[in-house]
Each structure stands twice: as C-alpha cells, then as structure tokens.
Image (spheres, helix red, strand yellow):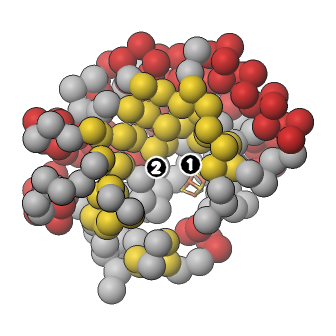
Amino acid sequence: MGNRIAYKVENNLYINLTNRCTNKCTFCIRTNCKNAYGYDLWLDKEPSVDDVIKAAGDISGYSEIVFCGYGEPTFRLNELIETGKYFKSKNKKVRLNTNGQGNIINNKNIVPMLKDSLTSVSISLNAPTAKRYQELCKSQYNDAFEKIIEFGKYSRVYFETIFSVLDILSKDEIEQCKKIAEKAGVGFRVRKLL
Ligand code: SF4
C-alpha cells in the first residue's frame, strides 16, 4: 500500500512529507528499491498538516518523531513548521533528517523559522569535498556542498546538530568529513547504507 505518511522504525515515528528532492544520490533507496523499511513511501499527493497529524495518531509511545521519508522534508516548509510544533507541544523529541539544502530550496535562511518545531537536525554531509559530493549526490545546485556546511553552522545555534556520512566512503574520506564536522562545531555520525 503506497501513500504512507507516517511509519514506525524501531521506537520512532517517521514522517514522509514529500518525494521531491534536489539530489539524485547514487545510493538513494528511492531509486534502488520500492520499499523502505518495508513500507511503500511513494505519495500520490503530498500530505497537509491535518493529514500528517491524523496519520501520526497516538504518538505517546514513540521516543522520537523524525521527518525523513523518500525526499527532502524542507520542500514542505510550512507543513514541517506546523506539524513539528504540534509534535513538540506533545513533549516529543523531533528530528529533521535533511540533505542540508533547505536554504537554497526556500531561498532564505529557514533555520530560525524551525526553532519551535525541532529538537535536533541530522544533515547528510555525504562527502569530504564539493567534487565528491556532486559525484555521489548529483545535486541540482553546484554550490550545494558549501550551503550544507553553512546549514549545519546555522542549525547548531538552535538544535543538537550532526553531519552524517555513509559507510560507503573510504576511511580517509570519513576522517576528512569528521574534521569538517569538528570545524563546523557539529556532531558526526557514520551511518550504515540500508
Ligand atoms: S538526498 Fe536523500 S532522498 Fe534525496 S536523492 Fe539523496 S538519498 Fe535520496
């Protein structure tokens, strides 16, 4: 069954706001498989604020609410802000998983606008240089890599923020990414490719 707006991963509830993305990552689960975590996340229609709240249902049992899905959540800025506020008002931890390009997508610094909607931000850095980023992630924006690092610096002012990379990178590349995270003042995590 498609059109899955909310889905459970371990003890967290993931929210799927959109299938749109500015990247075409070589490792993206959207292109590599039909299902993510056993759910078909293709949306015929992007959900409204009410749709998300209804799909989430009773959230009392979840550790964390995570905006993730099959696309870049910051494409749906208003829905992200409003539903995040709702989840936070229920005393939940709320995380944004993002490709870090939200400021280019929305043509403004969106980070302060999210301050009442999120508690943490996980940004996919994915590469140690702009050239490698474009090889792996094929952003439609040539300055994406610099903007991602900038997004992390803005984000750490308000939220617990990390840069993440996948374990498909070499040891050397992972080390370089770690240094970029340290320099930007954010945390760092190596994720396993699904
Ligand atoms: S940023 Fe995420 S959703 Fe977008 S193409 Fe890359 S892996 Fe897929």
Where is ligand 1, by quadrant? bottom right
Tag 1 near tag 2, CB within 8 Å: yes
Q: Is mark 2 within 8 Å of ligand 1?
A: yes
Q: Position of residue 178 (x, y in %)?
A: 72, 28
Secondary element type, mark 2: loop
Secondary element type, mark 1: loop
Can residue 29 be seen here? The reply is: yes
Q: Amino acid at mark 2?
A: Glu
Q: Which image quadrant is residue 157 in?
A: top left
Q: Residue at 62% x, 71% y: name it.
A: 31
On-image quarter of the N terminus: bottom left
Give the labeled residue for mark 2: 72
| In the foreground, 34 or 63 | 63
Q: Position of residue 132 (x, y in %)?
A: 82, 41
The answer for how far apart the CA atoms under marks 1 and 2 are is 8 Å
- Tell me if mark 2 has few (under 14), some (14-19) or many (20+) residues whose alpha carbon lies within 10 angstroms of its own: many
Left or right of 98 on screen, residue 66: left
Q: Amino acid at mark 1?
A: Thr
Left or right of 100 on screen, residue 91: left
Give the labeled residue for mark 1: 22
Q: Residue at 52% x, 24% y: name it.
A: 151
Check the image and report above or below for 114 versus 158.
Answer: below
Check the image and report above or below for 4 versus 16.
Answer: below
Task: Tell me the tag on residue 146.
Answer: none
Q: Is mark 1 within 8 Å of ligand 1?
A: yes
